[in-house]
Amino acid sequence: MKLPREPALIRIVEYAGDRFIRLSTAVGQLVLLTFEMIGRLPQLLRTPRILLAQMDAIGLRSLPLVIFASLFTGAVSAAQAGYQMQGYAPPSLVGAAVGKAVILELAPVLAALVVAGRVSTSIAAELGTMRVTEQIDALETMAIDPVWFLASPRFFAGLLMMPLLVIIASFVAIMGGYAVAHLGVGVSTATFFNGVKMFFEAYDVLVNQIKAFIFGGVVSLSGVFFGYRTRGGAEGVGQSTINAIVTASVLILVFDYIIAEVMI
Amino acid sequence: MSSTDRACDENGVGCSITIEGLRKSLGGQPVLRDVNLRIPPGETIGIVGRSGCGKSVLLKHLIGLMWPDAGRVLIDGRDLGEMDREELYRTRHRFGMLFQSAALFDSMNVGENIALGLVYNTDRTPEEIHDRVAYCLGQVGLSGLETKMPSELSGGMKKRVGLARAIALGPEVMLFDEPTTGLDPIMSAVIDEVIAELVEKLQTTAVVVTHDMRTVTTICHRVAFLHRGVIFAEGTPEEITHSEDPVVAQFISGSADGPIKPRR
């Protein structure tokens, strides 16, 4: 006998309710995990070796990728600024445009996006695999707190290393912009850097670093959160990895807008 | 005397475990309906039952890897559910667990796997830890394998390394989750022998979850048969293997015909 189907409206409400409950649960778990990790900070500082290892893995090993991406970001922005200003604005404005765009926007956002691609995914895949192969349970049985041992070092390493990466990214991008402005557009060294200095404000660096700090937290927290709550086998690990990078990328753009609205 | 000190003396008598009215549902399906079991100090008990009957779920409740929907687990009279994090971790110091998949940390070599609990839970010097790792590996017949990575080991060797890791902190209670699953009969016999020797030597309480009746008859003092979410039958291995109860008899004989209807 074929059962009568529920009315479409009821199914839609059920679906929406189910999604809302799942989302609320996930947000609650995310907040709890964040507080747990912050609570483990004193314990983590007593074992700096674990934190330093993650600062190396998340920060220093991302450096080549960040330098590469920043170099071309600066180069492209200089080429575009040179092209758009041709005949309309003085050449010194190329340096000003590149400097301002790189420090306020391009370096933090693009560095965060490339680091997210490398770090959020690797954290999610690593912790997810450890979850589904019972390695996290094994830590618990050995009386080693996995939040302290696995989650918090990754989270704090992201928070601490991203500002450093963004400073380097900003410098490299400006140098990339200078190379193209000088060699391609014909702007002299002095004119370019005078342009950079002309509109430079210390406040811009503050915005640059606040963005980097928040993006660092977003990148590492996405990886830790989705990795930590992985269920199932290889498919679950794959799904967690996708969720981590998508969430990190979206949140970087959302927070970029919010910070711009609030601070600029 | 702490459990870690006891590791050197190997004179423990284990501790008692009491399970009262344990209920647990997973994904809306009741798995454990009302489990009651008392395991006195020093006893080796086998928990047997069909695949998916909740044996591993029950085992994970004994060390706080899962929490009951109702009922409680008492370790030496203390309710696990009433312990704060510190007390729970202190209690876990008294446990050692061998996972079905061995759950070795795949980013660490064999020596680091075994040493991890000692590094973060004891005040031992690196030399003492090195000696303890060598001792534990010797106990499972794998001396000299410290520098091997888990990926270089066979299934049986992984289980033995998991066993060495489980005894590293000198546990008073050993939990074994399907210790011989996936191994050939000869390697299964080797693992059974190693477990029997270790449990005897360390004088621990031991809980062995398995559906391998040979493991039960080789190493267990008592057997509990888990069926439909309750302890359906309990007795010595002799009593269980000769039980006239049709359900138990069908499980022991491994027959497809009988009151237990196989899921197809």
Image (spheres, coloured by chain):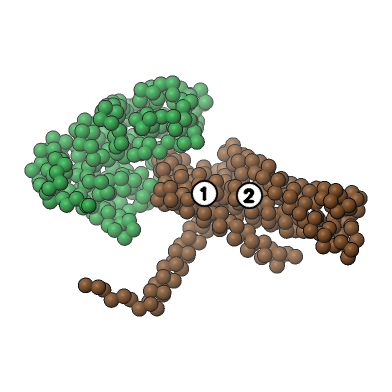
Label 1 CA crowd tier, 10 Å (few <14, some 14–19, many 20+): many
Chain label for disc 2: A
In the rendered view, does B181 fall on the left or right side of B162? left
Looking at the image, tell me whether mark 2 or mark 1 is earlier in sequence order: 2
Chain label for disc 1: A
The residue depicted at 20 percent of the width and 36 percent of the height is B213
Q: Position of residue A189 (x, y in %)?
A: 89, 49
The amino acid type of the residue labelled 1 equals: Ala
Label 2 CA crowd tier, 10 Å (few <14, some 14–19, many 20+): many
The residue depicted at 25 percent of the width and 30 percent of the height is B185
Q: Position of residue B41 (x, y in %)?
A: 27, 36
The residue beneath circle 1 is: A124
In the rendered view, does B5 fall on the left or right side of B56? right
Choose top left, top right, bottom left or bottom right for residue A65.
Answer: top right
Instruction: Write down the colour of chain A.
Output: brown
The reply to whether callout 2 and callout 1 are in contact (CB within 8 Å) is no
Same subunit: marks 2 and 1: yes
**Any mark on residue A115, and which?**
2
Q: Is residue B135 above or below residue B259?
A: above
Q: Position of residue A251 (x, y in %)?
A: 60, 60
Residue A132 appears in the picture as rendered: yes
Instruction: Write down the colour of chain B.
Output: green
Q: Position of residue B25 (x, y in %)?
A: 30, 57
Disc 2 to disc 1, how far (Cα)? 13 Å
In the rendered view, does B7 fall on the left or right side of A147? left
Secondary structure state at the residue bearing disc 2? helix
The residue depicted at 42 percent of the width and 36 percent of the height is B104
**Any mark on residue B27, and which?**
none
Residue A38 appears in the picture as rendered: no
Q: Nearer the viewer, residue B221 or B48?
A: B48
Choose top left, top right, bottom left or bottom right for residue B13.
Answer: top left
